[in-house]
Amino acid sequence: MKNTALTPVHTQLGAKMVPFAGYYMPVQYAGVNVEHDTVRKGVGVFDVSHMGEFILKGENALDLIQRVTSNDAAKLYDGKVQYSCLPNENGGIVDDLLVYRIDEKTYMLVVNASNIEKDWNWISKYNTKGVDMKDISDRTSLLAVQGPKAADALQSLTDIDLGSMEYYTFTKGKFAGIDNVVVSATGYTGAGGFELYFDNEHANHIWKEVFKAGEPFRIKPIGLAARDTLRLEMGFCLYGNDIDDTTSPLEAGLGWVTKFNKEFTNSEKLQQQKQAGVSRKLVGFEMIDRGIPRHDYAIVDADGNNIGKVTSGTQSPSLQKAIGLGYVDASFAKEGTEIFISIRDNKVKAKVVKPPFYK
């Protein structure tokens, strides 16, 4: 198991530590519901330093990104971030990722922790035009400071006007006295906030300064369990659960990041799939009867016929009801459709709803 630069801090704070994507990570501190609530209403800090970061540099950096990602990175400008995915050659997804344009010839790709090596090898395979690629994952720390009070809590640490930063933009500047910190108005919670990228050597200093500045706002450390409930309330996909090597971006509702004005891996077949229509779709659903849907539970119709499976499910702390995501036959994907989740051989009633669940 790898540690992040902050693993000793989490242990000292009494976090429950678990193996996650090859790292020893804090899953919770005070409890999932309390931490979830802290982020929805105030401000909380996640250590997500397990994520991967690649720098792509050179004349052909954009060309390489255009060929391996589904979204149109030509639309990016300096300081802009884009959500995208890496399609594979069989109609599935290698990974979903963020693309940061630093300048015309320099980009940062942020990938999922469990896929760092896989993504690196995949992109390298297509790097036929000499793009300079650097994997900076092991030396980069990443904090996600999330919640409606994040800007106020962090503002005293930087001259960057955090309140005026647009969603999915970033800037590089001085933060907590440290130069070259990437401050990004992104996150995986739907609660607003920022992600901070910096070298590992500054991790303890920045963590302390963030908590000192955030004290009047009751800032708290948050574990990965609450990150999961927060992202699920927004209907955000989790790689390995809701999307993987076998799910197409069109089935997963990621048509909005699949742009056919350029050629990319498997674009021709994906375009054919778009024209023909998909046979299954990822939908959101909420439980009508009591029961919590879990990953891999079967989804059935009124007669008990299998029509799909649950990919993510939980009891939503904000809504006080059970919610989930899952793939169903396309004929059951319409909003309001009644479906049933098979929980311990019982058919438990649910209905299809359009995410986000939490508005």
Image (cartoon, rainbow, N blue to C red):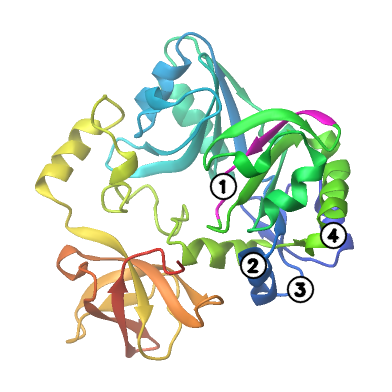
Query: Does label 4 or label 1 sit earlier along the sequence?
Result: 1
**Mark pair 2, 1: CA separation:** 30 Å
Reading the image, the residue beneath label 1 is 114
Q: Tell me which residue sits at (46%, 52%) in the image.
A: 239
Q: Is residue 163 above or below residue 359?
A: above
Question: Secondary structure under badge 2?
Answer: helix
Q: Is residue 107 above or below residue 160?
A: above
Amino acid type, residue under disc 1 in the picture = Ser
Question: Secondary structure under badge 4?
Answer: helix
**Mark pair 3, 4: CA separation:** 17 Å
For residue 30, which numbered disc appears in the image? 3
Q: Position of residue 30 (x, y in %)?
A: 76, 73
Does residue 53 appear in this view?
yes
Query: Does label 2 or label 4 sit earlier along the sequence?
Result: 2
Quarter holding the C terminus?
bottom left
Camera-side residue of 311 and 81: 81
Query: Does label 2 or label 1 sit earlier along the sequence?
Result: 2
Amino acid type, residue under disc 3 in the picture = Ala
Q: Quadrant of residue 27?
A: bottom right
Reading the image, the residue beneath label 2 is 41
Q: Is residue 232 above or below residue 100?
A: below
Reading the image, the residue beneath label 4 is 215
